[in-house]
Image (tube, rainbow, N blue to C red):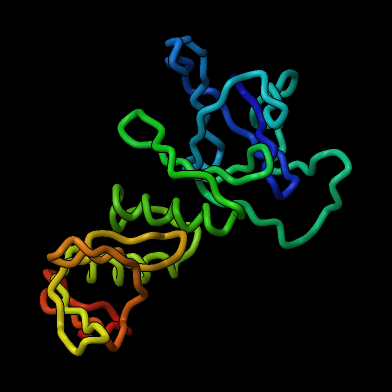
Amino acid sequence: QRLRVLYDDGVWYPGRIRCQRLVTVGEGAVEEKVFDILLDDGVTELTSTIPDPDIEIVTGPDPEEVPSVTPAAGVEEIDDKVSHIGVRRRDGYWVAELKRAGQTLKLGHFDNALDAARAYDSAALKYQGEKAKLNFEQSRQNFEEVAYYLHSRVRVLYDDGVWYDGLISGYDYKIKEYMIRLEDDTRFTSALPDPDIQVTSSSTIPPKGVIA
C-alpha cells in the first residue's frame, strides 16, 4: 500500500507499508496494530499506527506518478528543505528510530531534529559499521573518537593531588560527555580530553585529532 509521511520540514515524503503486526502495549497487555513503513529513499524506516495525522494513504495515481516531495498545504516552499534519516516529529518532539533485524529500535525523544539525527547516526554506525548511511559525515569522525575512549582505563586527578584509577563506562550523546566510574564506585561525566584525566589504555588506534 502506497502512502506519504509529513515531516517537520513541511514536506510529504512518499513510501509504502511493508507489513502490519500486533504489538502488546501497557500493563493490561492490550494488543495494538502497527505498520512498518519504508520511505522511497530506501533507508528511512519507521513504525506507526494508522490513522495518523502525519500519514496519508495514497490512492489514484501509480507509484511512479507520485511526486518525490510535495509541500504540505499552507507551507511555504523553500530551497533549503532538510530531512533526516530515521527521524520524525511527534507531538512537539523528535523521535529517532533505527530498523534492525526486523525490529524498530527506539533511540529516544529529543528537543530538536539535529540531536535526534546525531543519535540515529551513532546507532547506525554501531550496528551497521562503515556501510551506514548517515545524516552527517562528521558523525563518523565523532564515532571513531568515542570508540577510541570507550571502555578505556583512566586515572583521574582529584583536588587532594592523588590520581584515582577508573574506567570509561559509556558515553552520553545528549550532553556529549563520557561516563566514568572509579574503582571506589564514584561516578561522574566529563568531556575528553581533560588535563585531569589520563587515558592509560585503549584497544584502538586514535583517530585524527585525538592525542593518544
- Residue 53 occupies which quadrant of the picture? top right
Would you say 74 lies left or right of 166 here?
right
Name the residue rendered at 42%, 65% in the picture: 139
The front one of 192 and 187 is 187
Name the residue rendered at 30%, 67% in the picture: 146
- Residue 192 occupies which quadrant of the picture? bottom left
Position of the C terminus, as image quadrant, is bottom left
The front one of 206 and 81 is 206
Q: Residue furthest front?
A: 160
Q: Position of residue 65 (x, y in %)?
A: 71, 31
Residue 100, compared with residue 200, is above or below; it is: above
Q: Position of residue 41 (x, y in %)?
A: 54, 43
Name the residue rendered at 88%, 42% in the picture: 74
Position of the N terminus, as image quadrant, is top right
The front one of 152 and 182 is 182
The front one of 174 and 134 is 174
Name the residue rendered at 38%, 60% in the picture: 172
Would you say 205 lies left or right of 120 here?
left
